[in-house]
Amino acid sequence: MTQVLRILIIDDNPGDRALVIRELRREFPQIQAQEIREAAGFAGAVAAGEFDLAITDYQLGWSTGIEVLHTIKQQYPNCPVIMFTNTGSEEIAVEAMKSGLDDYVLKLPNRYIRIPTTVRIALERKQIKQKATLLEIRLQGLLNQLKVGIFRTYPDGNFIECNPAFLELLGLDSLSQASGANLLNIPEYYSILQELPPPQHQEQEIQLQRADGRQIWVELSIALNTVQGQQVLDGLIEDITFRKHAEIEIQQLNLRLEERVRERTSELEVANRDLVQTNQLLAMANQDLEAFSYSISHDLREPLRAIQAFSSILLENQESQSDLKNKQNYLQRIIASTQQADRLVQDLLEYSRLTHTEMPLQAINLSLLMRQTLRQLELELTHRQARVEIEEPLAEVIANSTILIQVITNLLTNAIKFVAPGVQPLLRIWTQKHNGFVRLWVQDNGIGIEERYQKRIFNVFERLHSYEIYPGSGIGLAIVRKGVERMGGQVGVESQLGQGSRFWLDLPITYN
Ligand code: ADP
């Protein structure tokens, strides 16, 4: 140690003072000794405080070593004091040590040598103590600044110590309030930690109530330790309320997002289904169109060819106009063919109009509508001597009256048309409730329809018989199907060849 060492030597005996200085110089050549022989000198030296260590005799003429010790330690608690004496007993030494004496050396020849060592150890201890004090101050400062609460408690929940952040976090005023409030439920943690294998430590996020009743989230880290044979719980708590709320908000946002994705997916599914349906409808429309184009060319060509043929015959026969009867016959056939072509075109127009026209729907009394339709068909019915039985009352439906009259007219004209020769047409009409719809039945005693044709006859130009036997355009039932479908219903037929047919229409029911 090259630093100047300032030592206060308090001893009445000049020889002993010289001895101490000589011994010290061996190890501390830079020594600055201040020798004290009486009370005034001691008081002056203490007041000036210019010393790093004091060595005092026990027996002084003007005081005792214990008093000297007290005086110095009172003013300079960290200043080492060593006693160098031949009068003190062991009891005195123990008492002096209790009062803060750093060491003592007996005034015996073989002990002088120990003086420098004792002084060095005392100085080193002083330095270590100073460092420790500094560290403690720094640590305390840090702990006080931390937003993390630190505590130590006995297993029963009595708090031993904590930092200000701990009290602040839990809204507490003092350590004793912390012990009384039991906000952390320490005894429960103690019983949990006790069961754990070492290290007996647990970390968890918990929600707890502060002393002022406010709920907060904290991250608690707690460990069971043993300090000087006593079990204690050391813990840290950190306020994570903000983070926790953010997490909860994110969770809720995620849930809402999932919900929206689900909604969107089902919307997409519906849109997809609609698209598939639209495509199916388009495909059907295309099929219709193909059948339509094929048949229109086919069916229109037939009467047109007849017109052509008979017109040429008339032209060729111009020379010999003798056969007037023949001419009349040809002309009649031409007229019939043009009528057939006209009928075809009219029906087609009717059919295509069904797709485009507005169709307001309303509640319709079928009994009234049926009577109205039959009145319109009266001439034809009488001509065929047809008998019509209606099972009154017929139900009410939601429909468009103009279209419904046309649909029923087509069914009735077919029913009286497709009968075997010489058979009186018998028609039976009734309604029934069926799967939430009103089903209107039109039954005839006609020629019947083979099962394999029962679906096809509702397509445009599907006809099962030649024009000569049963004249018609092949559009009547296509109009029936399209009209009913546009009113939200369905059509079908039950029949057997030669056993008559029962056509049915399902129409939406009224709810009044
Ligand atoms: P059209 O009556 O002009 O021939 P439809 O479209 O009305 O055309 O009918 C299609 C075909 O269905 C008819 O040609 C006929 O073969 C068959 N059909 C329709 N109604 C009946 C019925 N009541 N009894 C037997 N066959 C029928």
Image: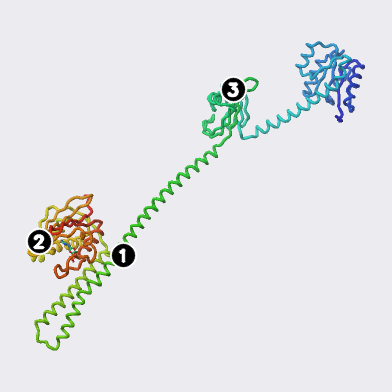
Q: Quadrant of residue 49 in the image?
A: top right
The amino acid sitting under disc 2 is Pro
Q: Quadrant of the N terminus?
A: top right
Q: Is residue 191 above or below residue 413?
A: above
Give the image location of residue 65, x and y in percent.
82, 15
Considering depth in this image, is 299 or 94 the residue closer to the camera?
Answer: 299
Residue 425 circle label? 2
Residue 205 appears in the rendering: yes
Left or right, 274 with respect to 160, comes to left
Q: CA distance from mark 2 to mark 1?
A: 37 Å
Mark earlier in primary sequence (3, 1): 3
Q: Nearer the viewer, mark 3 or mark 1?
A: 1
Residue that sits furthest to the bottom in the current view: 319
Mark earlier in primary sequence (2, 3): 3
Q: Is residue 502 above or below residue 89?
A: below
Q: How is the image coloured?
A: rainbow
Considering depth in this image, is 346 or 396 the residue closer to the camera?
Answer: 346
